[in-house]
Image (cartoon, helix red, strand yellow):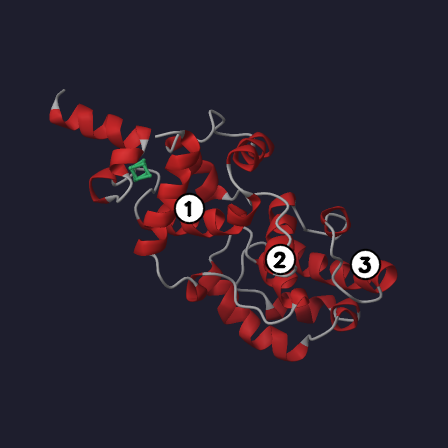
Amino acid sequence: MTKREAYKEVLRRLRQRYKKTDETFVVWTTPLELVVGTVLSAQCTDKRVNLVTKNLFKNYKTAKDYAKADLGTLKREIYSIGFYNSKAKYLKGIGARLLKAYDGKVPKTLDDLLTLPGVSRKTANLIMAKAWGKPTGVAVDTHVRRVAPRLGWTKETNNVAKIERDLNTLLDSKDYLAINEHLIMLGRDLCKSTPNCAACPLQDICPTGRRNLKSKSGY
Ligand code: SF4
């Protein structure tokens, strides 16, 4: 099986295992909500973010709402999310930047998204794919960074820019988002820091899984 055939098979099997994806990711209804939710989700669970944004999004609907927000109030509103001090500043900054440069709208290019405070390449790639249906690259988060090298899709284990480049070369762009979401679900479920290869549906096509099986069976 070639690497490309293997990745398609990985996606097929993971789609079978994880049929329902919506509730495990940031909940949003507008591009601005997606930007805010994704920025808030850095180093925090999506579940916690969704609890907080449920109320937050009732009070903040436009870029102007964030730009004009009282910083102390905003901090209190997102207090239960990690790094709330800097994230509150990011949200206010995003509102201001959107108003100043983009007529209050979320921009539709990667380069423009990267000018927003707190928006990393990972976040920008996600927004391009989810909000605009224009995948620009695989969003490499902590799970993708851990799982992709185990699957043999990249030799790089640390440098997220290099991992993204390797994945972008291997995958069809229409699969960037699906691979991101399914590797995240696999990373949360089985391919944790200590992988549970024995229970994994990819064991026979994953180089790390095969190695682990071999060493356990003594061959
Ligand atoms: S077989 Fe093991 S290392 Fe490979 S993806 Fe599954 S859990 Fe991760």
The amino acid beneath tag 2 is Gly
- Give how far apart the Cα atoms at labels 2 and 1 are: 19 Å
Q: Quadrant of residue 19?
A: bottom left
**Residue at position x 59%, y 72% in the image:** 29
Question: Residue drawn 51% across and 30% down?
Answer: 158
Q: Is residue 52 above or below residue 156?
A: below
Task: Give the percent coordinates (x, y) of residue 160.
Answer: 56, 34
How packed mark 2 is, by other alpha carbons closer than 10 Å (few <14, some 14-19, many 20 or more), is few
The front one of 152 and 212 is 152
Q: Earlier in the sequence, mark 3 or mark 2?
A: 3
Compute the Cα span from label 3 to label 2.
23 Å
Q: Are marks 3 and 1 in contact (CB under 8 Å)?
A: no
Q: What residue is at 47 percent from the left and 51 percent from the top? A: 178
**Which quarter of the figure has residue 198?**
top left
Between disc 3 and disc 2, the foreground one is 2
Instruction: State how far apart marks 3 and 1 are (Cα).
Output: 32 Å
Give the residue type at disc 1.
Answer: Leu
Could you tell me which secondary element the residue under label 1 belongs to? Answer: helix
Tags 2 and 1 in contact by the CB under 8 Å rule?
A: no
In this rendering, the label closer to the viewer, 2 or 1 = 2
Disc number for residue 133:
2
Which residue was labeled with disc 3? 97
Q: Which residue is mark 1?
A: 183
SS class, disc 3: helix
Residues 160 and 75: in front is 160
Quarter of the N terminus within the rendering: top left
* 24 sits left or right of 43 in the view: left
SS at badge 2: loop
Residue 79, given in percent of the width and then of the height, sits at 57, 65
N-term-proximal mark, 3 vs 1: 3
